[in-house]
Image: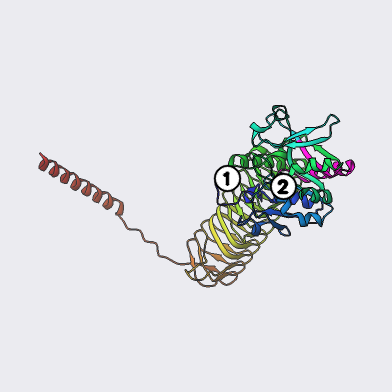
């Protein structure tokens, strides 16, 4: 991966890679979930809540990994083994695996699939009756029978085991192979030798085998995960105008009849209500968008947009921004840690931070809250129905009363009583003949510049 971040912590559509198999296990009701990790991997403290850890002290293969967890195996009834770097194994596949495992009365059941190019994946060798005989590892293909190497059915690395037979087989594993490792599939012939059933659950979805060992692999897996996420929303009644240009994280919630326009990215724990329109070209992170709201060409982080609100184009809602029903944030407006009351409007070219804006208030173009004096952030309050004139600076802490007005270009440093008008009177003067004098001065400067240039050329000659 060429990364300081452990491989299984790289995100896939907003969730760490290892979080995907953990979530799949939880959905099928796993009683305990344990991650087998290497020492000093940096993974332990980053695992989902409730996941146990088992340390594999020596990197001695997949069998060695499960041997490290043999005490946990012995305390269980059925054990499912998943790979932390194969995130597209989902709950539906695991339910099918368990069903096959139980119906077959198997000691072990493996998930298999067929690939056009099996590469170095382990090949599934079956007996004449179709039962699984063994898995042939192909990390060193020169040591593999060509007939077995030609098999296209591969072991995906996902298993269900009866715990007792698995524990017994683990104690008999050996590492007598070219790699010098303990291979988990080697428990299968041991179980078979004990007269136990080895079953296979064949999947027709090759994506169950999409593992991640490089950034290129990660891009392929994330593209497939994103396609599945979008498809699920489409099937649930969400309109996604162009799924190919829409990025939705796995934990995003979208209600039916919402509309997602092209170029939109919904991240984290975002929620979008019915009738809302998001996009085009909007990015929304960990935010809530209410029913029938519109967010166009805008960027939102940890914000709440109420019912029927309008954001954008080119709005920026920062953490703590709350828009109550019917309020508006217009073109090139930034809101931070501010509550807009119902029907309040900030239509154009404004920064409003650390403020309470009352219902029905209107902040004119270029309104600025001066909320920070270099040491302390203070709040601004604008009352219900107040009208703040264009290019007004509100120097916090300050209160503009209900129904009050401020004149255009004012700097408001003191509280404005309800229903009053606050202005900063500046006398306007007209200087007669200014333009002519300015033009004459420019001509003189030009002539002087030309004279100096000629003098310089003469010196050069």
> Which of the 4 image quarters holds residue 213?
top right
Considering the image in quadrants, where does the N terminus appear? top right
- Could you tell me residue 34's position as x and y percent? 73, 55
Q: Is residue 91 magenta?
A: yes
Q: Residue at x 63, y 55 (%)?
A: 328
Q: Secondary structure at mark 2?
A: helix
Residue 29 visible in the picture: yes
Q: Is residue 273 magenta?
A: no
- Return the residue at label 1: 1
Residue 195 is tagged as none
Which range of residues does the magenta coloring cover? 87-112
Q: Nearest the camera: 225 or 349?
A: 225
Q: Secondary structure at mark 1?
A: loop
- Could you tell me residue 161's position as x and y percent? 81, 47
**Mark 1 or mark 2, earlier in chain:** 1
Say above or below: 85 vs 410: above
Q: Nearest the camera: 458 or 395?
A: 458
Disc 1/disc 2 C-alpha distance (Å): 24 Å
Figure colour scheme: rainbow
Q: Nearest the camera: 357 or 106?
A: 106
Q: Residues within 10 Å of mark 2 (few under 14, many from 20)?
A: some
Query: Along the horizontal axis of the image, is 351 left or right of 101?
Result: left
- Could you tell me residue 442's position as x and y percent? 25, 49
Mark 1 or mark 2, which is nearer to you? 2
> Which of the 4 image quarters holds residue 185?
top right
- Return the residue at label 2: 63
- Could you tell me residue 131's position as x and y percent? 84, 34
């Amino acid at each position: 991966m060429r990364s300081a971040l452990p491989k299984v912590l790289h995100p896939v559509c907003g969730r760490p890679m290892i979080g995907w198999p953990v979530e799949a296990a939880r959905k099928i009701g796993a009683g305990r979930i344990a991650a087998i990790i290497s020492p000093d991997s940096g993974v332990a403290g980053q695992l989902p809540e409730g996941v146990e850890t088992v340390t594999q002290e020596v990197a001695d293969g997949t069998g060695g990994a499960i041997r490290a967890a043999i005490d946990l195996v012995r305390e269980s009834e059925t054990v499912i083994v998943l790979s932390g770097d194969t995130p597209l194994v989902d709950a539906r596949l695991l339910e099918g695996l368990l069903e096959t495992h139980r119906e077959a009365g198997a000691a072990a059941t493996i998930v298999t699939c067929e690939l056009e190019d099996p590469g170095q994946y382990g090949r599934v060798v079956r007996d004449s009756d179709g039962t699984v005989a063994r898995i042939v590892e192909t990390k060193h293909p020169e040591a593999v029978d060509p007939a077995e190497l030609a098999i296209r059915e591969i072991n995906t690395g996902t298993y269900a085991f009866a715990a007792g037979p698995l524990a017994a087989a683990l104690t008999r594993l050996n590492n007598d192979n070219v790699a010098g490792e303990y291979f988990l599939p080697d428990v299968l012939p041991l179980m078979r030798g004990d007269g136990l059933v080895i079953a296979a659950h064949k999947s027709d979805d090759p994506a169950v085998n999409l593992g991640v060992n490089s950034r290129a692999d990660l891009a392929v897996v994330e593209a497939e995960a994103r396609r599945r996420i979008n498809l699920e929303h489409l099937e649930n009644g969400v309109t996604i105008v162009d799924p190919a240009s829409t990025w939705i994280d796995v934990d995003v919630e979208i209600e039916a009849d919402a509309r997602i326009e092209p170029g939109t990215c919904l991240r984290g724990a975002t929620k979008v209500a019915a009738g809302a329109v998001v996009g085009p070209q909007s990015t929304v992170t960990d935010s809530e968008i209410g029913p029938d709201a519109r967010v166009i060409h805008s960027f939102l982080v940890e914000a709440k947009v109420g019912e029927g609100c309008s954001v954008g184009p080119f709005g920026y809602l920062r953490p703590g921004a709350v828009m109550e029903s019917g309020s508006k944030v217009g073109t090139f407006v930034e809101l931070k840690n501010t509550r807009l009351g119902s029907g309040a409007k900030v239509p154009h070219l404004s920064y409003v931070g650390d403020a309470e804006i009352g219902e029905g208030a209107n902040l004119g173009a270029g309104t600025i809250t001066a909320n920070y004096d270099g040491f302390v952030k203070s709040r601004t309050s604008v009352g219900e129905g107040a009208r703040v004139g264009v290019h007004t600076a509100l120097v916090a802490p300050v209160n503009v009363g209900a129904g009050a007005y401020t004149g255009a270009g004012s700097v408001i440093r003191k509280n404005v009583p309800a229903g009053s008008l606050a202005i900063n009177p500046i006398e306007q003067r007209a200087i007669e003949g200014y333009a002519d004098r300015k033009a004459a001065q420019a001509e003189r400067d030009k002539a002087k510049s030309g004279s100096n240039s000629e003098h310089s050329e003469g010196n050069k000659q």
